[in-house]
Amino acid sequence: MFAEIAFLLYLGHLLADYPFQTDHQAAHKAGCGRTGWAANITHAATHVLTCTLLLAIGSVLLGWQLPLLPAVVAVLWIGGTHGFIDRRWPVAAWMRIARQSGWAAHGGAAHVDQTAHVLALTLAALFLAA
């Protein structure tokens, strides 16, 4: 069951991060003030809704009996961690600590960002499958 949950959560992540993310969200989700926080929260909410929908579809089609409270915790974890990572400073801080400034200057932050998101999704899938 872990593999199916992880796949659906990853698919939800890709849908919410690419086709469902608006230009406004992408441009402002790391910004300060009301505009930045609104963009960040609506983008994170898109992740919560998309992953919730895919878990519900998986439950119906694959006959899962996911308990409601752990499922809610998992999708809120996904939304919360996604919003945190997308503030961008956590990725920048990690790359400074890991001495990856050269890689950061050449597009590496996007890879570290996506790896952090996949780690959070994997933890959520492990939690649900346990």
Image (spheres, rainbow, N blue to C red):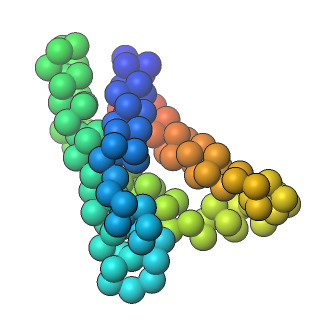
Relative vertical location of residue 50 with respect to residue 85 in this rendering, above or below: above
Left or right: residue 68 compared with residue 110: left
Looking at the image, which is closer to me, 120 or 53? 53
Question: Where, by quadrant of the figure, is residue 27 drawn?
Answer: bottom left
- Residue at image position (52%, 40%) is 118
Looking at the image, which is closer to me, 99 or 68? 99
The picture places residue 68, in percent across and down from the top left corner, at 18, 38
Relative vertical location of residue 29 with respect to residue 126 in this rendering, above or below: below
Looking at the image, which is closer to me, 60 or 91? 91
Whether residue 42 can be seen here? yes
The picture places residue 58, in percent across and down from the top left corner, at 23, 22
The picture places residue 32, in percent across and down from the top left corner, at 45, 83
Whether residue 48 can be seen here? no
Q: In which quadrant will I find the C terminus? A: top left
- Residue at image position (64%, 46%) is 111
Relative vertical location of residue 79 with respect to residue 10 in this rendering, above or below: below
Left or right: residue 2 compared with residue 45: right
Relative vertical location of residue 95 with respect to residue 121 in this rendering, above or below: below
